[in-house]
Amino acid sequence: MIRLFKRMYARVDAMQRGTMFRLIVSGVLSVAILVAALICSSTATMLHRDGELLVEALKTANSIEKNAVTKELLEQGTVTLGTRVYGSADLATQWTAAFADSGRIERVTEVAAMLLTTQIPAWMPGVFIDDPYTSLSTAATLIVFFNLLVWSGLFLQGTLTILCAICAGALAWWAGERSWAVAALGIPLAMLAFFLSIRIVLTLLDRRLGILAVASTVIKEAMAQRIAVAFAFVALGAIPLLPMTLDASSPLRYQVQTFLSTSLGVSYGVIAVMTLLLGCATVSFEIRDRTAWMTMVKPISRGHWLLGKCLGIVALSSVFLLVATLTTYACLLEVRTRPAQDIFDALAVREEVLVARIGTFPRYVPLPSEQLRAMVEKTVTTDPAIREDLDSGARREQDVKRELAREYQMNWLKQQRSLAPGAEQEYTFYGLSEVKRANTALALRYKFFSGASDSHDLYPVVFIFDGEVGWTDSKFVAAQTNVLPVPPAAIAADGSMKIRIQNVRFDPSAGDGGQFFPGGATIMFDHDGLELMHEEGGFEANLVRAQLVNLCKITFLAMLAVCAASILSFPVAALVCFAIFAAGSIAPFLALSIAEYNIRTEEWAPNAFEFVIRSISSVVEFMLRPFGQAVSTGSLVQGRLVSWWELARAFALIGVGWSVLVFIVGWSAFRRKELAIYSGQGG
């Protein structure tokens, strides 16, 4: 039986190398994938048209007037348009929370999307619903993948791997283990994509050029010695298993954020460790074993040899990062389809996490200079303690005035961020003309503190917008981020938006039409506690930019490892590289520690020690600050835009600037290093 299988395998393997076989298989697969994508795309387009009709119908709903649409929605959980019924009785209990005190539905588009889910065909993947073009882009990716599989000679091996993965995933799905099914499919396919990408990279590097030859050799050695395979299996095997570790009882937005943060952190960490170890090992061991000397005999200069080593490691890391990113995104599509706690949880995933947003802060009014100067002069003149310090020479008048001015200015700004019970403050946001022109959805992100800031209590607040938008009352959880949707109509013609915040509670049952009462405690927030967010792009493009920032950092690590190993032995080079990597990663925390570090004593010895420690730490933090600031994963997880400027800055400063500087230092030392000693005997 085994002999028969080997014979059949050899025959099919020989057949897949034929040009006609490859043309037929690639053509059939491409057509099949394209047809399936067109069906999904047309279905998604039809659902989007139905969604627009639902939005128009829901705009007429009013819980106070109790019109026909509202009655059907609240009693039956459905909306009927013509002969089609959207929604179900199971959703009826959720719609009460969707109505504001004004009687209108605050998030019409989102409610329509929830109603539309009942009309989605069971066979259609949910990820293709949000955007009709998603199925087409997925089809293009699959067509490229399978064509590369066919024309690279890995079609037979890939087909067997895919069939085994499908069988294992089907068994797990049949057993009710959805997460295990995703892992059973994801791990083999990720490893297959990794091997396929490596073969493509080796084909691209197969050129008659010294640098490319050295780079190709690095990749071949890493694959032959199973170094890259081991690291790839750890990272690519861990990512599909991460959804199992998520707490299913937590809100869906937290599950998505936890998965994104963990998977991207694991992949970046594993790639960084592999880059440093492989970079130090491939250079130091070749120098130790005199292999490098034999290479230098050929027409390859030392600088080209170092560049080739770095290029090979960067190419391998790029493949690793690409496959890890695709695996993360594929698993993310599964995580986001999990049931949300309520409609607001589902909306938070779409509008706050899987999006690229830009934040705008209100412009606070500083204390006028003349008034500030008068307050400082008055305090300096009338405060007895200050006068005593000035007369005795313990403090300088200039320092005292500077401290007082800073204190008064901070207190003035804090007053603008504080609302006593019943009080009102107005805040103005500027630079929103493009947002108004694009009619982009807005969200007010606020983090307030009130009373004891108990997370189990809800505190009232009222937001008042200019124009026809009017006001809305809300209840917030203190010391936690809350989000309020804001219509673009609230933006004025000059691109500004004024928001008045009142610390009051609205009781609709009191009086005739409701009554306002002062809040129970003072509301306060930090300088970044009030932010207006608007969408600037999609999540996918943001993910690509974030990973490119990580690639710039990995490029620097590769050059650092190669150049360090060309001068030092493997243990010392690895120690130096990991120390720099660790210091660069914790640079923001190091800066905070330096700011808080203080020895309170008048003795000269401890003060001298503090000066030395602070000086060394400050120099290290200053040099490695850009590396620590180039953290794109945090912005991605929070749904914030990773801009092209951030990517260009990381590329120019870390990917090019630092790498070139390290190369110059390493090459200058390496070109003077003696690689071998000729004894003058033999041959």
Image (cartoon, rainbow, N blue to C red):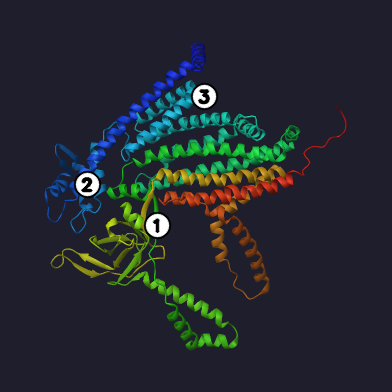
Q: How crowded is mark 3: few (under 14 residues within 10 Å), some or many (20 or more)?
A: some
18 to 664, vertically: above or below: above
Is there any visible trace of residue 79 in the rendered image? yes
The residue to which callout 1 is attached is: 359
Quadrant holding the C terminus: top right
- Residue that protrudes farthest toward the right in the picture: 681
Residue at horizontal 14%, vertical 39%? 82
Q: Which amino acid does label 1 sit on?
A: Gly
User: Residue 154, image x and y in percent?
Assistant: 50, 23
Q: Which amino acid does label 2 sit on?
A: Val
Q: Quadrant of residue 533?
A: bottom left
Q: Which of marks 1 and 3 is nearer the N terminus?
A: 3
The residue to which callout 3 is attached is: 152
Q: Which amino acid does label 3 sit on?
A: Ser
Q: Foreground: 600 or 196?
A: 196
User: Residue 434, image x and y in percent?
Assistant: 35, 55
Q: Which of marks 3 and 2 is nearer the N terminus?
A: 2
Q: Foreground: 362 or 288?
A: 362
375 to 447, vertically: above or below: below
How far is disc 1 from disc 2 in space, using C-alphas? 27 Å
The residue to which callout 2 is attached is: 55
**Of the numbered discs in the image, which one, if any, rests on residue 216?**
none
Q: Position of 594 compared to 640: left or right?
A: right
Q: Earlier in the sequence, mark 1 or mark 2?
A: 2
Q: How crowded is mark 2: few (under 14 residues within 10 Å), some or many (20 or more)?
A: some
- Element at label 1: strand
- Element at label 2: helix
Q: Foreground: 110 or 266?
A: 110
Is there any visible trace of residue 177 in the rendered image? no
Q: Position of 493 compared to 306: left or right?
A: left
How far is disc 1 from disc 3 in space, using C-alphas? 46 Å
